[in-house]
Amino acid sequence: MKKSLIALALVSAFTAPAFAEEAAPASDHTLTGNIGLFSSYRFRGIDQTFGKPALQGGFDYSHSSGVYLGNWNSNVSEYAGFPEGNLEMDVYGGYKHAFGDFGIDVGALYYYYPGSTNGFGKAVDNFEVYLGASWKFVTFKYSHALSNYFDIADTKNTGYFDLAASYDLGGGWGVNGHVGYTDVKNRDDLDYTDWKLGVTKDIGGYVFGLAYIDTDAAKSSYTWTKPTTGKQIYAGKATAVLSVSKSF
């Protein structure tokens, strides 16, 4: 009897912790980060770095309710419309929800270029709200400027239409495509369409990408000039962008 009691005590001692170590419930909060190196930074098809590479990165917080917040940053060129500035800082927040294969996304995004000047004693900025819808691997998103579009006079209510698709081929391979249209309020000369076709490969958590990007933006409106040398580039010309990025 005594031996049985001792054996039972030993079994209880070793098995009790197993109940205490049951898997904890999944957290309602998720925080992720990302960083990437790109051969060029194209915003809505337009060159933002005067042909130079870009280092980009940020972080995202999301809640199980669908609420999210984030920050994203990239170097830019002062000759691309941001006099005396060399950094873009974006802050955004919104709400996402999925209904099976369908999803919605509504939010706001603020673009800020610290150190730049718009000629009126303040930094270049832009504030937009957006509404998006998705079905499986296809998304459509409309963005609407509530301020002058990147401080261009009398361009409040500028809109951007974005249709995109991203498909997982398996084995770490993926393809993506996009077509967008910028409708600048009161400035028909600044309206244009941009498009993109790309392929990605995930190797050990690092995503390598190659994308073809092009626009029909007017050369007269989207040609940047470097005052110190007089060098000019057409910011909407076709280009191939190489990239490597990682999320953590």
Image: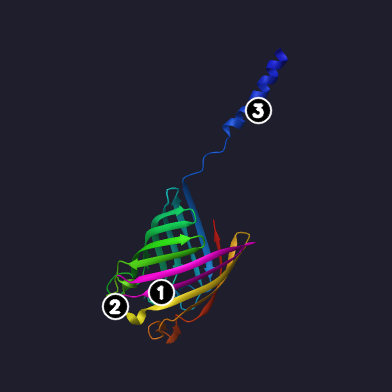
Side of 128 where 214 appears, left or right: right
| Sequence-first tag of 2 and 3 | 3
Helix, strand or loop: magenta stretch: strand
Side of 241 where 171 appears, left or right: right
- The image position of residue 207, as x and y in percent, is 58, 64
**Residue 174 part of the magenta-drawn span:** yes
Which segment did they paint magenta?
157-186
| Sequence-first tag of 2 and 1 | 1
Classify residue 204 by image quadrant: bottom right
Q: Are marks 3 and 1 in contact (CB under 8 Å)?
A: no
| Sequence-first tag of 3 and 1 | 3
In this rendered view, identify the residue nearer to me: 5 or 35: 5
Classify residue 149 by image quadrant: bottom left
- The image position of residue 227, as x and y in percent, is 39, 84
Query: How far is disc 2 from disc 3 in space, using C-alphas?
Result: 76 Å
Looking at the picture, does residue 17 appear above or below residue 8?
below
Q: Which residue is mark 1?
A: 181
Looking at the picture, does residue 151 appear above or below residue 93?
below
Q: Quadrant of the C terminus?
A: bottom right
Query: How far is disc 2 from disc 1 in space, using C-alphas?
Result: 15 Å
> Is residue 43 shown to the viewer in this render?
no
Q: Which residue is mark 2?
A: 186
